[in-house]
Image: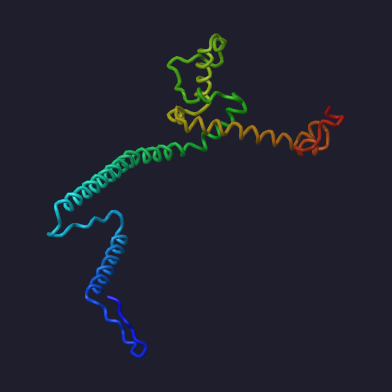
Amino acid sequence: MPCLILPEEQTPCPILPEEQSSTADSSESDSEWDGQNAAGADHISIPGPGASKGELLETLKMLQVQMQKLQEENRTIKEENKTLHAEKPKRKRHANAHDKLSVHEETISIYARKYGMMIEMFPSSDLLNQCLPDSPTPFDSTDRYATASTQESAFLDELYRHFPKSLHKVMESSYFSDLVMKSIPDARANEIKKLRGVAGDIFDLPSKYFTNTSYDRANVPEIQ
């Protein structure tokens, strides 16, 4: 109902009961909407005692979907826990094995350097992990070159004779072969470096020809 305001009397317009009810309902509706948004998408409101059958069925359906989602998440977490539990002992065993082998590191490195400089400069990494045959071909016999098999057998015979018996139990491990393959080029590089330092005295030439790796030796008449 429109309210007529006279110029002389600017009295406030009365609010009818219907308008008060509409305003209150709108305010309550806005509050409920804000509450639902704040609760999050996973929140499900349980209908009250006066809810209809359709509302109850809809709520039940939503609860079933949420339950299925939680079960899937729980199953995923259980699988992850199983994987972590299975890997944990392996990691521990691997760490323990590495610690047991690392005590031989210095000895292996020393003998590997000698082996690379005096016996085999470029050994096969595949053969370094193999065990010694029961009756190996002697490395110092002419039979070692008869076949590929005797060559490998003689290689292992010489390898196991070079390294002390205290290391034989670890020579089939990848730790041993990796350390040997690292120690040999390190030793070779170190010997070449020392040789560069005395090459000038050996050839009676200025040492800078050899110690300076960037020196243009190709244009030095004494070296050509």
- 3 or 14, which lies in front? 3
Which quadrant of the structure image shows residue 194?
Answer: top right
- 144 or 217, which lies in front? 217
Name, please, the residue furthest toward the right. 221
Is 217 displayed left or right of 48 in the figure? right
Is 166 displayed left or right of 112 in the figure? left
Q: Where is 51 relative to 103, above or below? A: below
What percent of the width, then of the height, locates residue 205? 83, 34
What percent of the width, then of the height, locates residue 104? 48, 36
Is 49 displayed left or right of 1 in the figure? left
| Residue ID at (83%, 29%) | 223
Is 217 displayed left or right of 155 in the figure? right
Query: Quick one: quadrant of the N terminus?
Result: bottom left
Name, please, the residue furthest toward the left. 49
What percent of the width, then of the height, locates residue 39? 29, 60
What percent of the width, then of the height, locates residue 217? 81, 33
Q: Where is 43 relative to 194, above or below? A: below
In this picture the colour scheme is: rainbow
**Total numbered circles:** 0
| Residue ID at (24%, 44%) | 68
Name, please, the residue furthest toward the bottom. 8
Query: Quick one: quadrant of the C terminus?
Result: top right
